[in-house]
Image (cartoon, grey):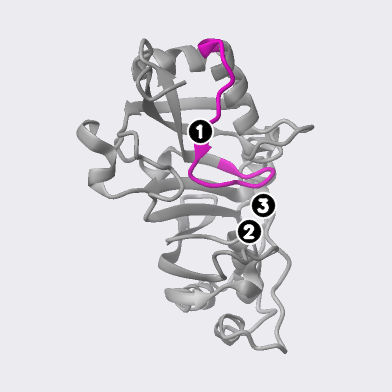
């Protein structure tokens, strides 16, 4: 498909990660990218490759995954969104579709990514209506200690201690722009974090360590020690994937072109 025959469309996707082996295409497993490319190939009557803003792991959800596809000229963004939502499995929904310049790149053009992690403290979070989308820890936590440890994450650090696998070509340093614990009204706590990039399983290892601090099993100072790569320290086990959402990916205003960025959504719209 040549650029003369096509135009680039940006999609904002929601998906329930419990149904997939992550975002990235895999030859033998069901993935979000695989399902999206399968349906687009049917619509375009040709093989299609979709570029996403980044990978989410098995079981991780998204309400702000960004993907771009080069579509035949006859497809408007609105028509493509309608067709996709009619044919995609129910665990995936296209929340927004808009034209973007040919140079728009969902991964390399992003300036920040934001995740939300939900920890259930109320007993009701063990219900299947909540447990699918949170970690029902149901334990008393020291939120002051957790907040202090989260504050140590701000700025640029090596997060190699919080990565399941390294990224040799890009290193292990990330710049965290925001990190805080807030109330999940009536149900528990939410950890909200934004950074220029994330390492593999980084948010889950951070949450697992922060919750151990909140349970009094680790001192607050361990977070700073881990960031300074103190060899005597190890991270706590990662938090379960079910509580994690890729919430938003941001780009410079000019990257969107004339259509502009999609409307921002409230975190309260998460399940």
Query: From the viewer's perspective, is the residue at label 2 or at label 1 nearer?
Result: 2
**What secondary structure do most residues of the magenta stretch adopt?**
loop
Q: In the rendered image, which residue does mark 3 sit on?
A: 136
Local packing at callout 3 (Cα closer than 10 Å; few below 14, some 14-19, many 20+) is many
Q: Quadrant of residue 32?
A: top right
Count of numbered badges drawn on the protein? 3
Q: Is residue 167 magenta?
A: no
Q: In the rendered image, which residue does mark 1 sit on?
A: 14
Which residue shows up at 38% across the image and 25% down it? 3
Which residue shows up at 70% across the image and 79% down it? 217
Of helix, strand and loop, which one carries label 3? loop
- Which segment did they paint magenta? 43-61
Q: In the rendered image, which residue does mark 2 sit on?
A: 200
For marks 1 and 3, give the CA distance: 22 Å
Question: Quick check: marks 1 and 3 in contact, CB under 8 Å?
Answer: no
For marks 2 and 1, give the CA distance: 20 Å
């Amino acid at each position: 498909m040549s650029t003369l025959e096509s135009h680039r469309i940006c999609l904002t996707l929601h998906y329930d990660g419990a149904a997939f082996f992550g975002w990235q295409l895999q030859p033998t497993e069901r993935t979000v990218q695989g399902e999206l490319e399968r349906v687009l190939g049917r619509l375009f009557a040709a093989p299609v490759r979709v570029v996403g803003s980044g990978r989410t792991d098995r079981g991780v959800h998204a309400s702000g995954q960004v993907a771009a596809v080069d579509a035949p000229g006859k497809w408007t963004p609105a028509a493509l969104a309608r067709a996709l939502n009619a044919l995609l499995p129910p665990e995936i929904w296209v929340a927004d579709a808009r034209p973007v310049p040919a140079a728009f790149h969902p991964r390399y053009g992003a300036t920040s990514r934001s995740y939300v992690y939900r920890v259930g403290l109320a007993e009701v979070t063990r219900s299947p209506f909540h447990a699918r989308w949170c970690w029902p820890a149901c334990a008393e936590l020291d939120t002051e200690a957790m907040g202090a440890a989260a504050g140590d994450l701000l700025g640029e650090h090596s997060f190699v201690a919080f990565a399941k696998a390294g990224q040799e070509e890009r290193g292990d340093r990330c710049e965290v722009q925001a990190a805080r614990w807030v109330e999940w009204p009536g149900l528990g706590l939410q950890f909200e974090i934004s950074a220029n990039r994330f390492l593999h399983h980084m948010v889950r290892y951070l949450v697992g360590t922060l919750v151990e601090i909140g349970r009094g099993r680790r001192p607050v100072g361990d977070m700073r020690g881990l960031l300074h790569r103190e060899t005597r320290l190890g991270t706590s086990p990662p938090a379960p994937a079910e509580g994690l959402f890729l919430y938003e990916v941001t780009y410079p205003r000019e990257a969107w072109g004339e259509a502009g960025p999609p409307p921002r959504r409230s975190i309260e719209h998460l399940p």
